[in-house]
Image: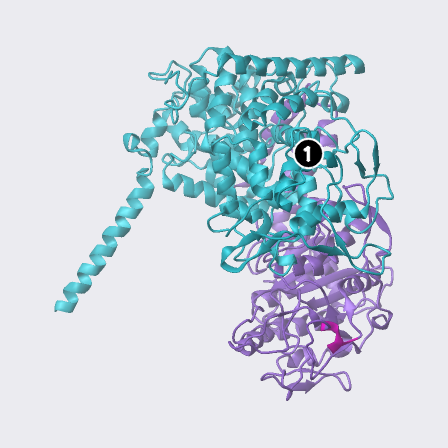
Chain colours: A purple, B cyan
Amino acid sequence: MSHHDLLCDPHTHLSRRTLLGAGAGGAMLSTIAHQLAWADAVGATETSRPKNVILLWLEGGPSQLETFDPHPGSAIGGEVNAIPTSVPDLQIADTLPRVAEKMHLGSLIRSVTSKEGDHQRAIYNIKSGYRPDPTLVHPSIGSILCHEFPEQLDIPRHISILPQNAPARGGYLGPVYDAFKIGDPQNPVPDLKSPIAEERFDRRMKDLQWLEDRFRRQRLRDLDQNRTLHQSSTDAALRMMSSEQVSAFDVSSESKETLERFGQTPFGRGCLAATRLIGAGVRCVEVTLGGWDSHITNHSLQSARCEILDAALAGLLDRLVEQDLLETTLVVCGGEFGRTPQINAAEGRDHWPHGFSTFLAGCGIRKGGVYGATAKDPKLDPDKPLADVGSPITIGDLHATILSTLGVPYHEERQTPIGRPLRISEGEPVKDLLA
Amino acid sequence: MKQFFVSVAKWSWFGLLMLIAFGYMASGLSEPSNDRRGEVEAASDVRLDGSSPSTVPESADLESAAGSPVDSPPREPSAQAESIVRVTAAVNAARNEQLAAFGLQSAPPADWMASCRRMSLALIGSGVSLQEIRGLESLPEDRRESTHLSNLLRDPRFHDYWAERWTRFIVGADEGPFIVYRRRRFRHWLSDELAANRPYDQIVRDLITAEGLWTDRPEVNFLTVTFDSNDGNPDPIRLAARTSRAFLGLRIDCLQCHNDFLGNVNLGDPVETREGRQQDFHQLAAFYSSAKTNGLQGVRTGEADYEYQYLDESETVEVTPAVPYAAELLPEEGDARSRLATWVTHRDNRQFSRAAVARFWALMFGRSATEAVDNLPLDEPLPPMLEPIVDDFVQHRDVRRTIRIIAQSDAFRADSRAAFDVTPQHEERYAVFPLTRLRAEQVAGSIVQASKIKAINRDSSLLVQLIRYGSINDFLERFGDLGENEFSKDGITIPQRLLMINGNMLREAGQLNPILNATGHINLFARDNAQAIETIFLCLLNRYPNAEERDYFIETMTERSDRGEALEDLYWTLANSTEFTWNH
């Protein structure tokens, strides 16, 4: 059997396994190890470096009142207290003490508004920037970024860690831009490791190629290139299986101290993996923390979630700063909507899209900024829900702001499969949020 | 002491119940009482070789043959059969004329096995089982395709699978609002409608005019799925968009916000069209404003009271229900939704039939005959092959009849290979059968089916059905679902490729498990390597290996010390091939 008969070089597998077995250090320092080592060393920022985004997706609707926009002592304040932050005159909830020390790294928006109060529709709205439309599935931020800036990487450039109900999708850009989904980074990446011995695997691949060659005969011209993409997708899959970049998913090589900084939780490990993946060249990582839908016992539910978020977000920002990645990496932290100012009979808060919070940091976002406000004593007029919100910002504008910091021409139109040209974002950037 | 005995009795009773439950699942007690055999016994009834079966049902009666491995073709009234032949001949003539006009040569007909595989993929979402192949082989070759088609059309797997495919284009792929929408109930209702072979226009009429609670009137979910965007009432805007796309093949969604300025939407008279206007969309939506939520009574019919503020207008105006073309077909009497249903399904509203036929054609081929299955401009003709089918559908509104016409056409039966150089134009004009990638659930369904000797259907043991359900769901979650984008032409993605190469489902389906899997069964019962290879080819690719393939794999298998391992590898290899994962 010659190597030319194989879809991949068996020596590559040997090399991969030897490398992974030996760890990232030593004389066989791999590409990823080089990149991570480089990222570990604080150096001058290269403005030409590509822009990235990490979305900390708080699914279920985090309460603005128990996180970034507390109103203690008011009728709507609940049991939460406010604490000072690293930004003068800015206070956030005492549920996020470590995050409070990092607020100078980004801008807090307290006036996000949308028209969607249903989880599924609101998630779609925030992730894509458009309201659900039966004619078209709109792409998410990461998909747009990967589409606008094509690059070659062994591992997927768009990753969703701990996805729940709606992992980021490529939408009309195609499933090739869907996020690659993984679970808790302490577990192996699914489907990446062959479950059989290498020799047997190589034999399978050889037989497969033999069959493929025969299937192509007398069929559509350039079948593989023009239609099935069997060869190229197989090659890419094998490349990923053999790639040293895969070690970026694995947080087990990190010190115990580092893991503790992020909190020993799946979400914390997800945030840690996100920094490693961004360091390895991934463009967008989405990390999901669910459990925010507190229709009952709001305070205890929100507090428990905040404990996880606090360590992970603070750890993430620290790490990005240490590795000089924050200048080129936008961190977005928020959910699909907020929660009602009123506390219901079950001590819960319900869905509230009329003024909730999102935190942005890095990648050209103004440092230490606060944008918008919600009323401490809201009138809650159902006919004028935005009357209690100062400087409301729409989902479209939030998207345009995010995309503009990433260098995406948000205002340009792209052709969609339904023959209708559509702007990448239907909003305009909020200049006060930009550095 | 008494308490001790009571406790022992309780636990013994619980243990006995668990044992019975396990036994029920494992032994196939859910099968009909006259066929309570375990999987191994049942599977061993299916011959691995091609010798004549001991008993092959040859019932001439359509209904009495239900449930048998191979049923005879239905005895259709000869007039009906003849009329189907006539329509098929017209479709073939249109194809030939078109090929001649473009100077294209036609591929020869595919063999019966390839045709049967195409039918199975289109109608039940998986390949042909070995059991079915063996049964069909017992019939004369010229009857195999028609028999298989007849069997499939009566098969609950067809009703369930098409109900799922229809559900996607009728209400979408999302789960919709909690409580007031139940996708599963809607799908089951559609399955029952398909099983009863209700005319398509009656099904659509029921959807548009649905009333009641989703719990006892599943069709009302067509309306309730839109509750979330309209404060607990059916959303006229979403329903107008859905109606125009799903039932009329018209994309008028952009008119929701503005008049058509790109020349994409032509309405008015089907012969002499005009540009689409914003009013067209909202007047259509106004029909659905008569659907009101009325507490525990669910959706009821009230007055149409739709208001809208058009672009560049300063005030909201009352919008009277009106249709975007062929207004003469709209009855003047009746409530708004009944009038709309009558107009949509009117025999002279040819667009309704065009949309239905284009949809069924796409479901059969896995690709649309036009650029998009829900974009059939009023003033643009369909491909000539579809016109005779539309003419027939206008008359009969019969889903199964339309499927028969398509499945028997030369276009559907053409080989995907040819002695000449096959170009995209050959595919576009159906000179060859166009290669289409299987949908995720077709890949999953085919993998699970190929891992069994017998057909997996409602008569299979509960355990087998549960395994199938669980495996497919897990696979879809990883593989991804195209949602409503039914006929995407995208190639496979890298994560999907990885799932096929290393994923659990394929590994478990190919394992040497003599009770549950075909590979284990074949390893036990195949008399030699040649028969084992042949059987695995039949299970996965639904064809015999050719001489070159047989020799190649016999050689590779002979080199191996462990035949079981070699069979697992062959299963994996075939399942990863383009031939398995594409329709051809």
User: Which of B434 and A208 lies nearest the eye of the viewer?
Assistant: B434
Q: Is residue B315 left or right of residue B333?
A: right
In the image, residue B448 lies at what x, y percent? 48, 36
Q: Residue at x 78, y 31 (%)?
A: B270
Count of marks overlaid on the render: 1
Q: Is residue B138 left or right of residue A255?
A: left
Q: Is residue A84 above or below residue B5?
A: below
Q: Is residue B35 left or right of residue B531?
A: left
Q: Amino acid at mark 1?
A: Gln
In the image, residue B351 lies at what x, y percent? 70, 32
Question: Of all residues shown, which one is farthest toward the bottom?
Answer: A73
User: Which of A268 and B476 lies nearest the eye of the viewer?
Assistant: B476
Q: Magenta stretch: dominant SS?
A: helix
Q: Is residue B173 left or right of residue A383?
A: left
Residue A125: name its quadrant: bottom right
Residue B277: name its quadrant: top right
Residue pointed to by mark 1: A231
Question: Of all residues shown, which one is farthest toward the left?
Answer: B1
Examine the structure image and report whether residue A30 is included in the region drawn in magenta: no
The quarter of the image holding the N terminus of chain A is top right
User: Which of B553 and A50 lies nearest the eye of the viewer?
Assistant: A50
Is residue B395 shown to the viewer in this render?
yes
Q: Is residue B316 above or below residue A355?
A: above
**CA neighbours of label 1 inside 10 A, class few (<14), some (14 to 19), many (20+):** some
Residue B512: name its quadrant: top left
Q: Residue at x 69, y 31 (%)?
A: B349
Magenta stretch in the rendered image: A385-390
Q: Specify the subunit that label 1 lies on.
A: A
In the image, residue B560 lies at what x, y percent? 47, 28
In the image, residue B316 lies at what x, y percent? 79, 59
The quarter of the image holding the C terminus of chain A is bottom right
Per the image, label 1 sits on a secondary structure element best described as: helix
